[in-house]
């Protein structure tokens, strides 16, 4: 990163420092402060304290960044860390001085919080096992990292209607949702990218519109620039509810959007040369045996492995960064990757190293169901309607008593509000927080969505199955699990042939 840009980010923090103290003193109201602070990756929490979101391109945490996180946790007594569905780490319950200090110190470790929220380009997402996964088309990290650097260079000058999320996908799994982000690059077998734009979750979700089938990899920054040109030219600056890029499909029409994008792309090529030719990093590491475990993934590098670790609810124990750093610091080329579902992957391990990491991470999810996804929820988030984390914990408690076999229940996705930070719309089962009026009294409730899918060529948003009272949902999951367990099956195998039985179970739990 250019020193001039680094200096600019540090200078901006002085303004943030003034604003956060003014907010604490009651000189700025919550709405005005949120409009400002989001641009620095920080928000005031619902009751007390502040959140700070780190930008970590592709969710990559090397040894230096891991040590920094561990140091900050200890120095500022951070008591809550959350892994997000955009592959970042959030510090919670910070006072104002800690927020400013961590934000400033992060820069010296290549971590920028600028643009971590607000109407800015957000953290660039990447398939979490890019570069090591056997099934990947090619390693997309070099282009994603170049995109992250490019967007950081424009953060302070862009004036967009709303945020812009860019994602890269290197496998058909499409875990980053590249086919329905604001802008997505999907790796193709010939070394090019399929490019999709103007998609997104949240209210009025849309699948992305394909604007190129085989874009040259060297031109990705021109496609990013073109998307920004389209968004700033045609985006809705008057109505925030209609300001995300997906609404361009309505205002311009799909054909009109494609025409506008191609026009902007031509303008970008004419304006400046943004072509890039990055290379993927290489290394050699001697193998020391083999290992097999359900949390161990064989890498494409012979003799090397990745270990998956999913902290429940994606809430990383504050002591874990230090524990992992001390474990990994003498293991060459190892690093952490944050998956979009809150799973941590520790990559580039030999068999013996993988066993050590397995032993140190046995406090995470023990089943597919326990890898379920949840946003931070209404106890922390100003926008939240329901306590999504509380619901997830209640579901875990109820289900654990039944000792179901792994796979009997699927991974579920829970969002505390329609914003879909828990990506409920693409979950096999998804819950979104709301209320249910019964006898003119509002009751905490969640709407159930069924059949979401994010894999390439199978993408689908879940359909609404009805609304359940929050207190009844754990019992619903138990009833569903018992039905499937009685059939000696798994949800994935059972559901397609038993939709009538599934609907009957749902109906029994719908709020009347």
Image (cartoon, grey):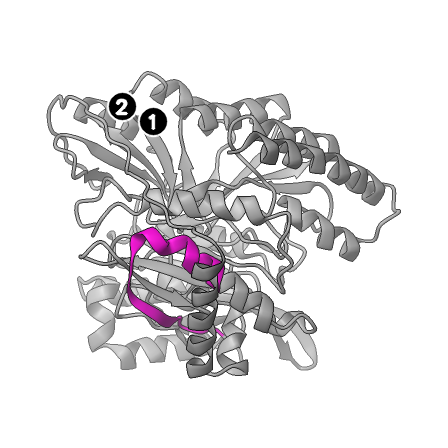
Magenta residue check for 219: yes
Residue density around tag 2, few if under 14, some if 14–19, many if 20 or more, within 10 Å: some
Dots 2 and 1: beta carbons under 8 Å? yes
Does 242 sit left or right of 500 as displayed? Answer: right
For the C terminus, which image quadrant?
Answer: bottom right
**Boundaries of the magenta span:** 205-226
Q: Residue at x 52, y 76 (%)?
A: 248
Q: Position of residue 331 (x, y in %)?
A: 29, 20
Label 1 residue SS: helix
Q: Quadrant of residue 409?
A: bottom left
Q: Please tell me how crowded label 1 is: few (under 14), some (14-19), or many (20+) other residues with Cα within 10 Å.
A: some
Which residue is denoted by mark 2 in the rendering? 356
Q: Is residue 108 left or right of residue 281?
A: right
Q: How many marks?
A: 2
The x, y position of residue 251, in whole percent, is 55, 81
Between marks 2 and 1, how big is the CA–CA gap?
Answer: 6 Å
Residue in the image at 53% along x and 75% along y: 247
Q: Residue under label 1, please give it.
A: 360
Q: Is residue 421 visible?
A: yes
Q: Does residue 27 appear left or right of residue 370 in this picture?
A: right
- In the image as oriented, which residue stretches furthest toward the front? 270
The answer to if 328 sits in the magenta stretch is no
Q: Secondary structure at mark 2?
A: helix
Q: Residue furthest top?
A: 330
Q: In front: 325, or 208?
A: 208
Front residue of this view, candidates 291 and 24:
24
Residue at position x 67%, y 70% from top? Answer: 237
Task: Give the answer, above or below, for where 13 lies relative to 474.
Answer: above
């Amino acid at each position: 990163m250019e020193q001039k840009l680094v200096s600019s980010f540090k200078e901006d923090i002085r303004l943030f420092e003034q604003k956060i103290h003014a907010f604490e003193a009651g000189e700025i109201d919550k709405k005005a402060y949120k409009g400002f602070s989001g641009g620095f990756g920080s928000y005031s929490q619902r009751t007390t304290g502040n959140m700070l979101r780190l930008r970590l391109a592709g969710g990559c945490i090397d040894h230096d960044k891991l040590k920094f996180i561990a140091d900050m946790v200890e120095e500022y007594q951070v008591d809550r860390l959350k892994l997000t569905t955009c592959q970042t780490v959030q510090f919670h319950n910070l006072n104002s001085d800690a927020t400013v200090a961590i934000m400033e110190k992060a820069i010296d470790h290549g971590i920028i919080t600028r643009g971590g929220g607000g109407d800015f380009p957000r953290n660039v997402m990447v398939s979490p096992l890019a570069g090591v996964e056997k099934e990947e088309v090619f390693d997309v990290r070099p282009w994603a990292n170049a995109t992250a650097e490019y967007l950081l260079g424009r953060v302070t000058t862009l004036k967009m209607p709303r945020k812009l999320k860019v994602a890269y996908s290197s496998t058909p799994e499409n875990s980053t949702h590249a086919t329905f982000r604001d802008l997505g690059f999907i790796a193709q077998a010939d070394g090019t990218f399929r490019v999709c734009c103007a998609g997104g979750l949240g209210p009025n979700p849309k699948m992305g519109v394909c604007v190129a089938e085989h874009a040259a990899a060297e031109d990705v920054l021109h496609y990013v620039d073109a998307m920004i040109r389209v968004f700033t030219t045609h985006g809705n600056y008057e109505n925030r509810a209609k300001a995300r890029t997906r609404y361009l499909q309505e205002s311009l029409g799909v054909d009109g959007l494609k025409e506008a994008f191609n026009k902007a792309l031509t303008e970008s090529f004419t304006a400046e040369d943004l072509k890039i030719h990055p290379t993927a990093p290489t290394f050699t590491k001697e193998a020391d045996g083999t290992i097999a475990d359900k949390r161990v993934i064989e890498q494409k590098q012979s003799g090397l492995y990745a270990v998956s670790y999913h902290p429940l609810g994606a809430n990383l124990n504050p002591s874990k960064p230090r524990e992992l750093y001390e474990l990994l610091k003498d293991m060459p080329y190892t690093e952490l990757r944050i998956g979009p579902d809150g799973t941590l992957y520790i990559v580039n391990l030999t068999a013996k190293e993988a066993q050590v990491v397995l032993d140190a991470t046995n406090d995470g999810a023990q089943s597919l169901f326990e890898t379920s996804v949840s946003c931070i929820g209404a106890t922390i988030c100003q926008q939240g309607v329901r306590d999504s984390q509380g619901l997830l914990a209640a579901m875990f408690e109820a289900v654990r008593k039944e000792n179901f076999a792994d796979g009997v229940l699927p991974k579920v996705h829970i969002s505390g509000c329609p914003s879909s930070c828990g990506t409920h719309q693409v979950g096999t089962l998804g819950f979104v927080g709301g209320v249910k009026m019964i006898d003119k009294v509002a009751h905490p409730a969640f709407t159930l969505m069924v059949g979401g899918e994010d894999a390439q060529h199978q993408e689908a948003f879940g359909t609404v199955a009805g609304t359940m009272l929050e207190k009844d949902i754990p019992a619903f999951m138990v009833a569903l699990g018992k039905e499937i367990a009685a059939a000696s099956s798994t949800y994935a195998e059972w559901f397609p042939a038993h939709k009538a039985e599934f609907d009957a179970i749902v109906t029994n739990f719908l709020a009347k």
